[in-house]
Image: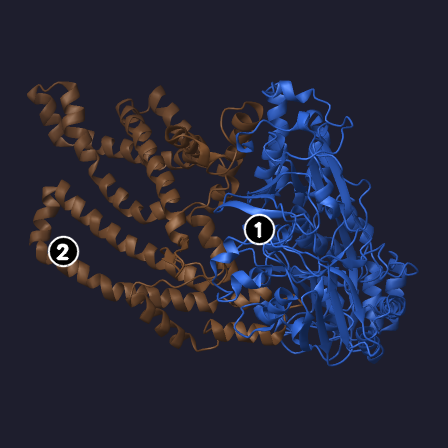
Amino acid sequence: MLKYLVKRIFWMIPMMIGISLISFFIMHLAPGDITTTEANFNPKASQESRQKLRELYNLDKPVIVQYGLWLKRIATLDFGTSFASHQRPVFWQTKDKEGNVTLGMIQEALPITLLINVLSLLLIILIALPLGVVAALKQNQLPDRTITLFVFIGFAIPGFWLALMLMYWTGVQHNWLPISGLNSIGYERMPWLAQQIDTLKHLALPIFISAITGLAGIALFVRNGMLDVLNQDYITTARSKGLSENRVIYGHALRNALLPLVTIFGLSIPGLIGGSVIAESIFAIPGMGKLFIDAVNMRDFPVIMGILTIGALLTLLGNLLADIMYAWADPRVRRGVAQ
Amino acid sequence: MFFNRLFLAIFRARENHRPASRMDTGSQSIANEDGCIPRFFFYFSRAVFAWLSLSFCLVLSACNNANEATINIDYSQAAQPQEGGTLIDASVGEPSGLIAMTAGESAASAIASNIFNSLLKYDKKLDLTGELAQSWEVSPDKKTITFHLKPNLKWADGKALTSEDVLFTWQKVTDDNTRTPYGADYKLVIKAETPDANTFRVTYEAPYAPALDSWAGLHILPKHLLKDQDINTTAFKRNPVGSHYYKLESWKNNQHLTLTRNANATQGQARINKLITRIIPDKASQFLELSADNIDMMGLNPIQYSRVLPARKELSKNMGLYKELGNGYTYMGFNLKRKPFDDVRVRQAINYAINKQEIIDGVLLGLGEPIASPYKPGTRWSNPALKPYSYDPEKARQLLKEAGFSDSNADGILEKDGKPFSFEILTNQNKEREMSAVLIQRRLKEVGIEVNIRALEWASFLGRFIEPREFDAVILGWGLGLEPDQYGMWHSSQQAPKQFNFISYNNPKVDTLLEAGRLELNPDKRQMIYHQLAEILLEDSPIIYLYAGYGLTAVHKRVHGIDSPAPPAGIGHNTHEWYIPSQYARNEISEH
């Protein structure tokens, strides 16, 4: 097992280099760079100044040389500084000689996106599990049909539309929830508990919106998994042993039905750091989605590469984690790996 | 459109300093190849979707508004000008820093303009007047300008503001290590000197008329805080010390910036105590915040202005609506190196075939004006004698016939030398431009010209089509700066790949006028030069002026002291005189 793990982790290094190389080249395939997006088409910005900027950012060098420079920096875990936003560090904070701390861009955006995604994932599980089980137990009956209809409506409804409707209802018509932003003005002066409540109130709608659209997948996955398992011989055996229906369903059936979910959650780890551009724009939440799309539009290469690299690393780790969890949960897989 | 965004960021609009012609790349693309009714587009735009949703909401839920108590206040009752209060507005983008020369984006210069002064400024009639400078003189040979600073100027931290600071700022903006794209105007200065603490003198190699404008666009920075700093990375950009009405109190990343009054302000005291700019990227969300009375002002789009607000009585009752001509215009430009656009008759024919009023009505819901010169109507540079091309398809057909086009195979498309007259209009992903293109497509089809439309992402648009000159025609916008010099756009020497005369316009008469305009410092004589320039451009029709849109702003009526009707400089010219009577101020925890 340990040998397997070491091997998997070792293989991640060439994978990461390959992924970063491809990302870097694809990024440079798109026409334009920061001097195009920042200063082009402004008659006040002269040709010479733009060329000077290109030299400062090493954009005048061949792509492969630029990649080498990037790789050299990243080897020391230096993600560089952003072109577009005034040399802010891409990943982690830096301190200048007077002790002024500049926060990293990913450092700021990541916790917010993670918080929203983790909370909405928890909400999804909390709702989807019982819904899926009920739907499977009452297959093709009224509860099943209702649940299926409900989750599909949630899936099909355009998120931004629902978001605007809810913002109007809870924010304009009734003064229940704030409309947009992450904190109220005057947040700094609130006591600790009030601050937490304030943040949660701001996050309530974004979490709800992101959960409602993700609900359908998991609920139907649980339902179908349960149905599969319920038709297995060992369930019939369990029933014929005279076990109570609760034991059969929650002790035997559900445990097996949840196995594939482990894979899904492992695979959703990289998704946890990716924010939704539309939701983040509507709710004015400074998360990863907005950061990425702004970086792409501005051709802010260090930020794009920073996010892609961290995303790729998390995807690889997520895959690894999913495999490990799967092996841990399912003895059959464990045995297969050991051999 | 870029000028709508400008109006969002309304304080002390300094059009000349921000990227005058940078264009918005926002808004999603709607691929459209068929010429269906243009209004159709609107129903897909998010703003309308939001509007439909809102009205739907209203119908459903008999509108029990929670803020019943505040609704019946009559905010418009006269009150004495007074100090205090907080004004909250919204910006779609966050500034990357508050040193405008290195930040570049409009969000940055809008906020920085409340914090920093320039030597000169534009007054409400858009004439140049002194800001830090009390007066200025131009030497008889027109090469030297001497600025006399007002006495006893102070930075917000109490240190004296002197000509040393001005010199320092000039050194920074022309320094090769400063990452600014805006150094070109200042690099023409061959000698800058400070004879005494209140005098700053610059000498140019040759007379340069746009120089004064450039000094109205350079925020003066404090030498004592920046002299040992790297201006590109200094923490000062997020913690600035300026000399204008306001200073930065707090900056919560990506959420809001709070400015508070500067006790040492060089231009006297503003009345409103605090300005808060909230960063809300989505205009529909901004509108909801406005509806819930969480922000006091925002820039509206035409639909919000003419449909949504009027339909919502309880909201519009409390809103002052302001309409003023924006700072840019939209045009269709030709690649003059390609046939048949090298023929002036063809360009004129297309100009006659396009119905501009129809575009203004359909795309801007009537909230725009046709223009006949590349200058803002109503300013001195705009030639009032010129009239836009009328909509006259008969004349267009006539001109096309003279140019040798005829429909020889009766397929509805004109041909010349056996080749059908068909071309492609390129534009970036900007809904107003895409919709204009569709209307143009239909009108040109009526005179026998086949048009295809392609909308592209901004950087690809520039990199793959504009720079290599791989296009037939484009729909784009230019800024209507306050400085009339448009050398870069029209002079025949400015055609290199990344220069701005990308349509390859080459007219010796225009070249002469542009050169003369740069040397002429007398405003009345300059005016004649640019009036003549506009006349030739209109006749020659290298681009077709489509429209100049209005900037539309809603400001809550609790804010008093706004000039109405808006003067040429816009309502933002006197924000320091705006005030909020204390009985109308919202209850705020942030007041203490």
Q: Which residue is mark 1?
A: B28
Q: Secondary structure at mark 1?
A: loop
Question: Where A252 sits versus B63, above or below?
Answer: below
> Which amino acid does the dot numbered 1 rest on?
Gln
Is residue B407 visible to us here?
no
Residue A233 placement (x, y as % from top left): 12, 31
For residue B586, side relative to residue A130 (left or right): right
Q: Which chain is blue?
A: B
Is residue A312 visible to us here?
yes
Residue B391 placement (x, y as % from top left): 86, 56
Question: The C terminus of chain B lies in which quarter of the figure?
Answer: top right
Q: Callout 2: few (<14), some (14-19), or many (20+) C-alpha neighbours within 10 Å?
A: few
**At 29% across and 66% down in the image, what residue appears?**
A76
> Which amino acid does the dot numbered 2 rest on?
Leu
Residue A256 placement (x, y as % from top left): 17, 34
**Which mark, residue A5?**
2
Contact between marks 1 and 2 (CB within 8 A): the answer is no
Same chain under badges 1 and 2? The reply is no
Question: Where B404 sits versus A170, above or below?
Answer: below
Toward the viewer: A138 or B590?
B590
Disc number lying in front (1 or 2): 2
For residue B92, side relative to residue B302 (left or right): left
Residue A89 placement (x, y as % from top left): 40, 59
Q: Callout 1: few (<14), some (14-19), or many (20+) C-alpha neighbours within 10 Å?
A: some
Display colour for chain A: brown
**At 27% across and 43% down in the image, what residue appears?**
A264
For residue B536, side relative to residue A335 (left or right): right
